[in-house]
Image (cartoon, helix red, strand yellow):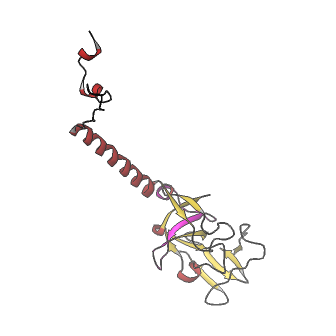
Amino acid sequence: MEATDMVLSPGMRAGLPTRDGTPRRRVWRWSQIGQAMGIAALVVGSYLFFSHFVVQSICVTGPSMCPTLQEADIYLVNRLSSLFQTPERGDIVVLKDPTDQAYVVKRIIGVAGDRVDLGDGNIYVNGEKISEPYLAQGTKTFPFTAMTETVQCGPDEFYVLGDNRFLSSDSRSYGPVRRAAIVGWLMH
């Protein structure tokens, strides 16, 4: 039997030239188009699920977390942990700013039930001065409204500050934030 006499399926003939030497065109069947659309929908759905519930990238804009985080750097946000973990003092979190609902990056200073006192350029949590090794040497923290400030975090509230205390809009201006405002932990 010669090669020209063989019976080939349409899929096998797709790459072979016709008798006159011109290439054959690939004919798409409806089942193949449906499979391609299903795969595309699965890819888009997976991306949306992972970026909204698992891990999301975020670009730092503004100097409020300098020197810890630099402006224009890109980090990943662990959104899944926000469903299972409780924020702790010192954690760097991404939250929705209560004033304009934009995503911002801040450090947690006080957790639910804590009393936060700002005075003498220092921070006291439950009466004890906290150590802040992540700040530049000699950085002071002052309240925006008075010489001293005392804030009691209610249940499910957190006191947050930017590491660049002179250029950060944070709990000193809008008060403690609710747990629901925290969308995830910064992975750095």
Quarter holding residue 70: bottom right
Q: Quadrant of the C terminus?
A: bottom right
Residue that protrudes farthest toward the bottom in the picture: 146
Total numbered circles:
0
Q: Quadrant of the N terminus?
A: top left
In front of the other: 27 or 164: 27
In front of the other: 137 or 86: 137
Residue 185 painted magenta: no
Where residue 8 appears, as percent x and y from the top left, is: 25, 21
In front of the other: 99 or 130: 99
Residue 122 placement, left or right of 97: right
Residue that protrudes farthest toward the front in the picture: 20
Where residue 17 appears, as percent x and y from the top left, is: 30, 28
Residue that protrudes farthest toward the right in the picture: 137
Residue 46 placement, left or right of 136: left
In front of the other: 65 or 31: 31
Up-down relation of residue 9 to residue 145 (above or below): above
Q: Please tell me which residue is depicted at 25% across the width and 38% down the height of the picture.
A: 28
Q: Please tell me which residue is depicted at 47% across the width and 73% down the height of the picture.
A: 102
Residue that protrudes farthest toward the top in the picture: 1
Is residue 154 at least partly visible in the picture? Answer: no
Where residue 81 appears, as percent x and y from the top left, is: 51, 55
Residue 94 painted magenta: yes
What's the magenta region? 82-102
Q: Please tell me which residue is depicted at 53% across the width and 66% down the height of the picture.
A: 94
Is residue 8 at least partly visible in the picture? Answer: yes
